Amino acid sequence: MKPAELAQKFEGIFGARPRVFCAPGRVNLLGEHTDYNDGFVMPCAIGFSTRVAISPRPDRKLVIRSEDFAEQLEFDLDHLPRQGTGVWSDYVLGIAVMLKEAGHPVSGASLLVRGEVPIGAGLSSSAAIEVASALALMSLNGTRLSLPEVAKLCQRTENEFIGARVGIMDQFVSCLGRAGHALLLDCRSLEFKLIPIPENIRLVICNTMVKHEHASGAYNRRREECDEGVRILRQWYPKATALRDISLEQLEQHTSEIPAVVYKRCLHVVSENQRVLEGGKYLTDGDVKHFGGLMRDSHLSLRDLFEVSCRELDIMVEIAESLEGFCGGRMTGGGFGGCTVNLVKAADASRFAAQIAERYQASTGITSDVYVCSAANGASAD
Ligand code: GLA
């Protein structure tokens, strides 16, 4: 459906002409579980977006609807909850709450959401709805925040209103991604560099269609294990405030003094940061082959050290490696299910997509969704 049709639909429901804002999901090429360790990541925005249509209301209500759900939710702007209750509208509401808390004006509004980012696939449908909602709500009052500030507001919404201790990666690239480019982000300084992805390369995203139950609890536990690693390492490196500040050589000097599980988590993060920096150089040189090698190392590290892969992700990666046109691939996102991302030669991409779906089905019995994508632009007004 075209954006104009969303506006038309909105008019049919609310009787007013809306403005429409759009924000994409993302796929991460390299740098997993490094963002909340003040490290480096290299995601791209993708061509699946969430759109939020908005118009002002004369009262003090937020009225929120989505094309995907039947109900209409209404909230009183003067009595907003402090925390989400686990419903889809939390992502919109949470933005309003965080804007207000930061001292920005929030006025009555009607909103209609259209989400095209597959939900629960690890492609950041939540960042997409947050960013689009932030731009929409800000537009009613002329609130001007830079895009990195918008990303931070959206991350705060996840951390404080939704209760997920996520890093900044997803919201940042949803705001600032660029078509045809990967975004190498320093999650501490928020400095970033856009690196062109060679034109003859496609991103083939393969959804395992599984989402393991324990994912969000396990995510938070991984964060705690990383924090514990920092606490221990500070005995020897008191200036370190995050795993970002620890080198591989430093870590390896203390193998026997750190509990085995915590050590493995730290080793993943420290080496993954190095891979992103190295990968940035390879990609800048158009060296997809060596970049692909780092993606493979990243997958093995996520599987064996950080332990966030699962059988289905491993199978998907293994099949990809045997197919024509494959240049590199790995699990992407938080893990425990969700998607793999593969760099595939454009000429082979559609055959690759058909074959991987067929072989994954043969070995798991699961019908997967496979998307052939290119890096897309970040958030915008339609
Ligand atoms: C999720 C979080 C991100 C990041 C990844 C893992 O997508 O939202 O902040 O931590 O997991 O790299």
Image (spheres, rainbow, N blue to C red):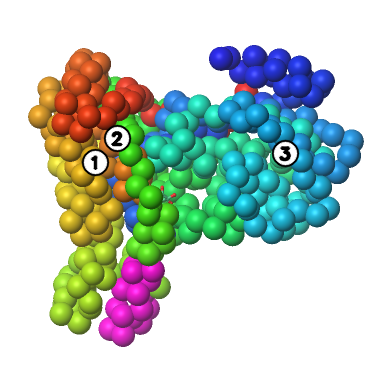
In the depicted structure, whether residue 40 falls above or below residue 366? below
Horizontal arrangement in the rendering, residue 307 relative to residue 65 (left or right): left
In the depicted structure, whether residue 105 falls above or below residue 45? below
Category of crowding for the residue at label 2, using alpha-carbon neighbours closer than 10 angstroms: few (below 14), some (14–19), many (at least 20): many
Mark earlier in primary sequence (3, 1): 3
Q: Position of residue 299 (x, y in %)?
A: 21, 47
Q: Position of residue 332 (x, y in %)?
A: 31, 42
Quadrant showing the N terminus = top right
Residue 81, image quadrant: bottom right
- Tag 1's secondary structure? helix
- Tag 2's secondary structure? strand
Category of crowding for the residue at label 3, using alpha-carbon neighbours closer than 10 angstroms: few (below 14), some (14–19), many (at least 20): some
User: Is the CB–ligand 1 distance for label 1 below 8 Å?
Assistant: no
> Which residue is rendered at x = 81% and y = 33% of the image?
56
In the depicted structure, whether residue 216 falls above or below residue 130? below
Residue under label 3: 73
- Mark 3: which amino acid? Leu
What residue span does the magenta drawing correspond to?
224-240
> Which residue is rendered at x = 22% and y = 29% of the image?
365
Q: Position of residue 42 (x, y in %)?
A: 35, 44
- Tag 3's secondary structure? strand
Residue under label 2: 208
Mark earlier in primary sequence (2, 1): 2
Category of crowding for the residue at label 1, using alpha-carbon neighbours closer than 10 angstroms: few (below 14), some (14–19), many (at least 20): many
Marks 2,1: beta carbons within 8 A: yes
Residue under label 1: 313
Can you see residue 71?
A: yes
Outermost residue toward the right? 58
How far apart are the alpha carbons under marks 3 and 2?
32 Å
